[in-house]
Amino acid sequence: MKFLDLAKVYIRSGGGGAGCVSFRREKFIEYGGPDGGDGGRGGDVWAEAVEGLNTLIDFRYQQHFFAKSGQHGMGSQMTGKSGDDIVLRVPVGTEILEEDEETVVADLTEPGQRVLLAKGGNGGFGNLHFKSSTNRAPRNANPGLAGVERTLWLRLKLIADAGLVGLPNAGKSTFLAAVSNARPKIADYPFTTLHPNLGVVGIDGHEFVMADIPGLIEGASEGRGIGDRFLGHIERSATLLHLVDGTSEDVAGDARTVLTELEAYSPVLMAKPRVTALNKIDALDDETIAERKAQLEAEIGTPVMLMSAVAKQGVTDVLRALWSRIQPTRHQDSNDDVDAPWRP
Ligand SMILES: Nc1nc2c(ncn2[C@@H]2O[C@H](COP(=O)(O)OP(=O)(O)OP(=O)(O)O)[C@@H](O)[C@H]2O)c(=O)[nH]1
């Protein structure tokens, strides 16, 4: 699944139709009064958050959204037809920003939430409207109001329950593929994960969303590598899974690198409940496993779980540990009814 988290769209609401100047013309009726109808309203452009979407990829193929203008008014008091509204269907969690990429127009956090992005122009009045006691044959009508044109950014922050962090090649993609419905690209070189992937994980009858974030490297929070671009996606998640490659000679140093980056990027991320797992234990003998587990625990100061994504060893325990940290936040969400994480 390809993931696009930023999309630029050009929108325009429809202009209003012009009012009509017309007079009633019928046989045997002389000086029929004005009967010019009003112009139709132009179509609005709306955005609506819908469930079941988790990327903005559709907006890569279509970027222009122009609503139709209203039709002009006609004789015999006929109002012009209104232009149809257009609705941009976006994933829940999409922010809409002005062209400057900073000013927030809307933050769509609930399914069904709608925001008017550009209002269609009103139709102009036909000459019927201008009839008065002093002017029984008005020859004036209003033009319709013009539509509104805007350039906007759509920005999607993934709201995953669990975020996967670790150095490139720690095995994050392999793990996500092993435990979820996601099928990320897996390869034996760093930075395979150019786009974060989302997967739905099932454990003991519960489901949660896990996001695979491209590998962090030293200096990522200052803009090196590509991990930093995606750290924002996991800012709102309930917990993090830190995977450490057990085949590395320096597991403590690897873990330190990742934690330093998290700390530098955001204290919020650092403060999240975290599960740390030593991965790829299928490739190690027992002695090495024990040694590296001890080194890692000494470095981070919390217990380390043992796991192999490939051999599916220890995986269930890791998922249970994650779920035990996610569950309390779900409870809280349903009570407060605010900022509920997105559910597929
Ligand atoms: N032996 C062993 N190899 C593993 C395991 N998990 C992953 N690998 C291998 O490690 C390499 C990297 O795995 P990925 O899942 O692509 O790693 P990643 O952390 O997603 O890497 P980036 O996407 O580059 O950040 C691949 O060759 C995997 O086959 C495991 O449990 N055991």
Image (spheres, rainbow, N blue to C red):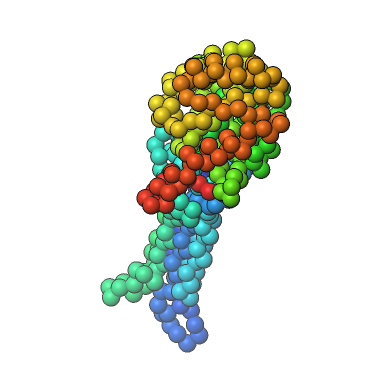
Q: Residue 82's spot in the image, x, y percent? A: 50, 63
Residue at 50%, 69% in the rendered image? 74
- Left or right side of 229 for 2: right
Q: How many marks?
A: 0
Q: Name the image quarter holding the N terminus.
A: top right
Which quadrant of the view contains residue 286? top right
Residue at 48%, 20% in the rendered image? 300
Residue at 41%, 61% in the rendered image? 124
- Left or right side of 116 for 50: right
Nearer-the-camera pick, 46 or 238: 238
Which quadrant of the view contains residue 309? top right
Q: Residue 331's spot in the image, x, y percent? A: 43, 49
- Left or right side of 337 for 219: right
Is residue 290 at all visible to an observer of this figure?
yes
Q: Residue 13's spot in the image, x, y percent? A: 48, 51
Image position of 291 with respect to 20: above or below: above
Is residue 64 at all visible to an observer of this figure?
no
Image position of 276 with respect to 147: above or below: above
User: Which residue is farthest left?
Assistant: 134
Nearer-the-camera pick, 215 or 58: 215
User: Which residue is farthest bottom?
Assistant: 28
Q: Residue 24's spot in the image, x, y percent? A: 46, 77
